[in-house]
Amino acid sequence: MKIIKLYILALVAGLLIIPASCSKDFLETRPTDQLAAGDVFNSLTGAWGAINGVHRTMYIQYNGVQAHGGMDGLLRYIDFIGTDVLFNTSANGWYLNAYKWVDHRNERSNMVLYWTNLYRLISNANQIINNIDNIAGAESEKKHIKGQALAYRAWAHFMLVQLYADRFVPGGANTHAGIPYMEEVTFEGKERNSVAEVYTKINEDISSAITNLEGYTRTNKTHINKSVALAIQAQIALVQGNWNLAATSANAARQGFSFMSTAQHQSGYNSISNPEFMWSSYVQEDQTMYFFSFYAYMSHNFNATAIRQSPKSILKNLYDQISPTDIRKAFWYPNAVATGQPVVPPNGLRYNYMSSKFKSVSVSDGRGDFPWIRVAEMYLIEAEALARQTGKEDLAKDVLYLLAQNRDPQYVRSSKTGQSLIDEILIQRRVELWGEGRNFTDLKRLGLPLVRPEAAEGGEGGHVASIAIKLTEPAGTNNWTWMIPGAEIDSNPKMVQNPA
Amino acid sequence: MKKICLTIATFVFVACHILTAQNMKISGTVTEVGTGAPMPYVTIMVKGSTTGTTSADDGSYTINAPAEATLVFSFIGYIKTEVPVSNRSIINAQLEADAVALEEVVMIAYGTAKKSSVTGSIASVGSASIEKRPVTNALAALAGSAPGIQVNTANGQPGSDPGIRIRGFGSINYSSEPLIVLDGSPYNGVMANINPSDIESISVLKDAASTALYGSRGSNGVVMITTKKGRREKLSISANITQGFSARGLPEYDRVDAYDYYPVMWESLRNSLISSSVTNEEASFLASGATANGIVRNLGYNPFRGVANDQVVGTDGKLNPAATSLLWANDLDWYSPVERVGQRTDAMVSASGGTETSDYYLSVGYTTDNGWLKKTNYDRLSARANLNFTPRKWITFGVNLNTSYNTSSSANTAGNTGYANPIYFARTMGPIYPVYQHNRSNGDFLTDDQGNRIWDLGAQVVEGGVTYAARTQNNGRHAIAEHLLNIQDFQRNTIQSRAYAQISFLKNFKFKVQHSFDITNYLNSSYENKLVGDGAPQGRSRKEHSLRYTRTTVQMLTYDKIAGKHEFNIMAAHENYENEYQYLYGFRQGEIIPGNTELINFTTTNSLYSYIDKHTVEGFLSRATYSFDNGKYTAEGSFRRDGSSKFSRDVRWGNFWSVGGGWRIDKESFMTGQNWVDYLKLRASYGLNGNDGGISYYAWQVLYSYRNNAAEPGYIQDTAPGNPMLKWETSAQTDIGLEFNLFNNKLRGSVDWFNKESKDLIFSLPLAPSTGYVSQDRNIGAVYNRGWELDLTAGIVDTKNFSFSINLNATTYTNKIKSLPEENRELGIIANNTLGLPMYKRVEGGSIYDYWLRQWHSVDPTNGNGLFLFNDITDEAGNYTTVWSDADCKTLADGTLVTSNQAKAKYDWSGTSIPDVFGSITPMFKVYGVDISLQFNYSIGGKAYDYNYASLMSTGGMGAAKHIDILNRWTTAGQITNVPRMDNAQTTNFNAASNRWLVSSTFFSLRNVNVAYNFKPNVLKALDVKALKIYASAENLALFSARKGLDPTQNFNGNILNDVGFNRVVTFGINVNF
């Protein structure tokens, strides 16, 4: 009897235990929405994924901050702290403290966190640059991947040094503090390189990128090919006052790109198919950035609160310098309120001189492919760089004519010389690149003061003192340099903050 | 003979007298204190005799006893009660459950234990206390229930989980939420899935001895929920129905009205216009005028009847005296379209009982709980079956099955100042803007074709050739309309099952297997309308679907042996835990047919993805308890070895353990004769456990995330790289407690001292952003929570018709950071608040929530500037690191350096959000059979950061509402005030985040009132029921805080945000037992 009972007990116990026994890898789990770093750099396919990821970092939302929609968010800031984009109201708070020149001087503001975003891009590029040589595969393909990564590294450092360091003085020693030039993947923060050192490395990288990208045919314009790398080189050279290089690179870069038609001109600067876009994002339906998108702040048609409440206008002083026959003049509506134009989202407000240059895909779709570099800029760089070289003014006028005549059929080849010619080119530059994020960096590179004219009594098209607060800033003050984020100062003992 | 007769007569007389006295017949009913339920099988003895009887099923009894005798009523687990007969023939007695009945069984980790042998600190809340509270989420009933437990007020969203902290904050960057264990297995669901009426008890395990067996998940404390179980007796049916009403419990801040508003905003505008080129007078003229700069143009709406736009505020800053009536006075309350008296209904039927070999508890319950804010509600249908069988003495098995169907709609309060947040919107809307559209000249409501009022989105309108400007505040938005037109709903279906089998063998051994399987299906549907808001003009819809499976299997072997005075309990077990989460998200826009919010009815896909996450834990655990002389001395030890999938193979196994001891001092011989001591126990414990709550499932892995570029596959590396060396946070806790019952159990209570030292804290170590990374999780840092807990219950008066007792509990603790990462030691870590803004600074020696803010100083009496202390930090050369400029900095007469520029303000310590002491006071009365209990909660000390107030005190913000304190603003030179001048151009400075917005978080609240009456047996007999109770209960009746509108318990970190304030709920209920 007793034995039978024991059997029963054993049977019951066995039944109880069986369902609980578990396999050896019970504690090994892995995510399904991410992949291990080791799986990225073990094939060319993985490496292509990594460089594609870098392209994508140009248009992801950063830090969970609404104002950090991609690198276009950074370019927006650059215009908002310039002279040519007007805020018409304080009723909408978006970017208002940037406009007032508060945020870029506050180490705890979100604005200065673009530092983090740019370095994030650099780190992703460094992973590629430092790992690609160990991957098996065609050398040419590896070069094309690496070349793009190098171009990104140059571009991101170039943006950083322009904003977070004092101005690069062409011809000067530029031994003042720049930014850390990051070439390795590390957890340790580095000290700041001097501005001169940073530019040396930027130039090395972009040159190397251009070499590596020889023969690369890209699948779409989100990628960096040799033309784009040359365009970046031209931008860098322009800031450094490296006029010859700027002119030749810009010239080389613009080859093969044509101007947009008048119809394309009015289509909203939002499509990668625009022939002037040399390098741009290409935002798919399911990659929308909603209210973080560039077009949620700078378009006139998207149903974003910032668009409805605070459409942006052009500075009247600049607008008045545009010839009436210039097709660009139609972007802005000096009498928007009275004429009820341009189209605005339901319940949207209009302010005079408001812009219609940028359009989102639709009133309910905030997407748009933002151009990181447009070919028009290459003409402007080339013209400016030529105009600043002795004996090349005629060449400058020729290049300027190509662009200006395209925009204004009535345009007459410039007869100006010297500084007047340069000024004309710079006005063209302000008009052409309005809203595309070149305003503040141009003022800074040229060592110009910030001058934000107010409108005449009761008029519009000027900055409003109670909204802008900051109306003037002399050139060369500390205020031209963005504060390094507190997060960097806190966690990098080698970092020195910019003077208050 | 005569003498003899007399003697006999006397004898007979006396004898008769005596006989009558001896034979007095007494009857009555015995009921339970609190529930009023009749108690069968109660022993009733005549004191000092052997005469006795027991009560019948209905609690009734009859006994013969002398008129001057005393009856003794006793029943196991209840306090023995003596009642003098005093010539009464009917004696109804009530027995009260003995709080420290020796054989009382309490829930402990992986089992139960006799209260006398418990060496840890466990607070228990029984079903009687839970039933008093009209709450949909049982965790809300923990507030104030016991010391050492901090519970936030659940917000006005019915069913929401309140935050809970047990003995402080054991983690800085990860979860400090306790582990929830439901019927013996870790529970990942929401507590609102469980009907509170099904809960038998909630035990809160506070110290390491109680929680060490939960190993890597136990260090924040454990909340153990035990559901009801049948008794092995006759069938009992209980039916309960309550009907209640909920209304807004938290009042609104006091805000200025239209008449005060206009002059205040005029001033703000006027002062902002003054500049080097515009004089004071010119500015006044501009501000009063109807030009682009006029105040009416700046606010958009002129609500005053018969007052022209350029006449509203004079150049003297005064409201036009003709402005005496408003065009839409009846339409300025933005809460009114969404405020209501919500209904709350709770109905429940349960059946329980059993036989010698089985027991059962079956219930079905329905709850619908509607908050004060329209469209906030929670509906639950739940059913439970708890069945246990013992077919043979050596085997027991059972299953406890619960299923629930939950639906809820809620308000969009995501983002403190999100345009769609109805609370933010209603609170900050200037008092001049109507909710609905009006004729702007005569004030009449405008209506649509159907005669309905039209939401006023604030657009610019042209009426009769006159252009009326747009509403300045939130133009084009209408969160009230959006709240009503949008949908934010979820459905949740859950099953929780617990099945076990236990066999006994070899006399002292038991082997048990418990398998738990929880399923949660969740579908969140949200829709944003086409008319107004983020979804306009196309409409958009989201679906979020998740499945969660949690499986836990425990095999447990126990050995129980009593040898004379020695008692041993030994347990060893193995546990597997598996938690799988499947998630699917779809988001489309472009509504095709109105009214259909399913994704197929939309044209464009904004987002579509899915993933599966998995977390597994394996543990080996054991416990040994030794008790001598019926609990006089108890020693206990426990050990658990845990492995977790969150950590890498090399470091994923860890050991956790505890030791504890108990000493029943009252059982010592030297205590004999100390009659005033009924119970006295000293206990002490020490142990080690862990915390992995909130840590990513894949925290150790270095990962890339999918980010396709255009249509090409792409990956981006995470900014927080995984750390293969990462392991859980551990905490070592010491607890010393004294439990006592004194003066005939009239005074009961406990005092505990605890010291919870957490180390290896996982710090999301900030990495220099220039590396491309933002942070990495590392085990660095230590914090301790050290403090006292006091729990006292005193029976003050106890007479036949009136009794009064009171419970008081208090907790005080210190939260202190012991060590920080090396890199942060010197400067500390600036930590962000809920909104992602820097607010706290963490340094060694400080607490987790020490405010680090700009230092507000005063208002400059000469010009009304807001002044902060100047940042006087100097560099090595002794120069200020902040640029001093006479334009915005000055030295006050007393030498204080101040600045009106927020960017130059000094940051300093500004107090903490952690209170000095908190707890509750619970008086209980019994008056002629009516039970009344009240619960007051209190908290003293600590500060809250009142964002709402700060926003209402802005010196600008055209169109935004203002707090009445703004009326104290600076207006004239020499004026002493603490509110700076109104100035729309100075909001960045005057309104900067600073210690000015801190407010005391001390509060006193009347959390609950419960009044109950149990009908007398004669009524019950007539109705043929076992017990009948009617009751009324009210929750959140009153809150006294430093500022009207302020609920300091909103967040542990002290942030006061635009959330749906709590409901005040009043319910009436009836409970009948058959």
Image: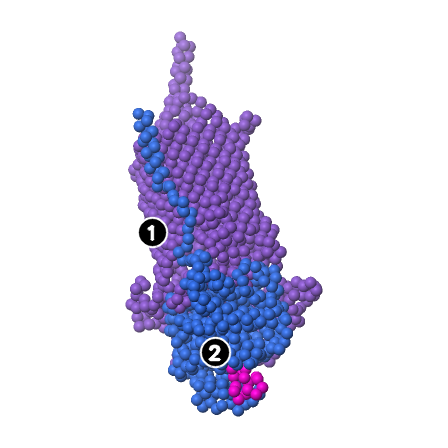
Identify which amino acid the numbered label 1 is placed on. Answer: Asn
Chain B shade:
purple
| Residue annotated with mark 1 | B493
- Range drawn in magenta: A381-396
Q: Position of residue B306 (x, y in %)?
A: 45, 77
Q: Nearer the viewer, mark 2 or mark 1?
A: 2
Chain A shade:
blue
Calculate the distance from the C-alpha at mark 2 to the C-alpha at mark 1. 61 Å
Identify which amino acid the numbered label 2 is placed on. Answer: Ala
The dot on residue B10 is none
Residue B19 visible in rendering: yes
| Residue annotated with mark 2 | A253
Is disc 1 placed on a helix, strand or loop?
Answer: strand
Q: Position of residue B116 (x, y in %)?
A: 48, 33
Q: Nearer the viewer, residue B432 or B501?
A: B501
Q: Is residue B921 above or below residue B19?
A: below
Q: Nearer the viewer, residue B493 or A359?
A: A359
Q: Quadrant of residue B907?
A: bottom right
Residue furthest top as drawn:
B1
